[in-house]
Amino acid sequence: MSTIDLSAGNFEQTVLDNEIVFVDFWASWCGPCRNFAPIYEAAAEEHGDLVFGSVNTEEEQQLAAAAQVTSIPTLMAFKKGALVFSQAGALPAPALAQVIAAVRDFDVDAAQAAGTD
């Protein structure tokens, strides 16, 4: 599956309706964003069972601000609607693969239960 464009109109529903969602916050003028884009696309193709979304921060400034994105590219991962990963900076393919594996393995239910004690 290729990446999907996320906007203020579909962001929340996409995060809530899918088990795991990765989100790349980017802008067309950003060199590191352009370098990361093919790595992100390849990961999306390789992991068709996951949702890979992209937010153009120039077009979606309010969404980027609401997500507290202060540097781009920023990669976020949501699992069961909860933010479980957020990091600014372009990742090389092996590092992105490690993040994907870690998010798959992360027990968000246990983490949320531990946080309510």
Image (spheres, helix red, strand yellow):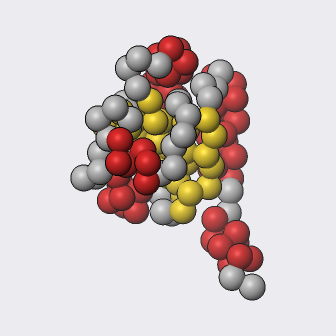
Q: Is residue 6 or residue 61 the one in the foreground?
A: 61
The quadrant of the picture occupied by the N terminus is top left
Q: Position of residue 115 (x, y in %)?
A: 71, 76
- The answer to whether residue 14 shows anywhere in this view is yes
Q: Residue at x 42, y 44 (%)?
A: 64
Tally of marks: 0
Q: Is residue 99 or residue 32 the one in the foreground?
A: 32
Q: State which quadrant residue 18 falls in.
A: bottom left
Q: Is residue 86 above or below residue 115?
A: above
Q: Is residue 81 above or below residue 73?
A: below
The quadrant of the picture occupied by the C terminus is bottom right
- The answer to whether residue 52 shows anywhere in this view is no
Q: Is residue 106 or residue 54 the one in the foreground?
A: 54
Q: Residue at x 32, y 41 (%)?
A: 60
Q: Position of residue 32 (x, y in %)?
A: 55, 18
Q: Is residue 91 or residue 102 the one in the foreground?
A: 91
Q: Residue at x 68, y 53 (%)?
A: 105
Q: Residue at x 63, y 40 (%)?
A: 87
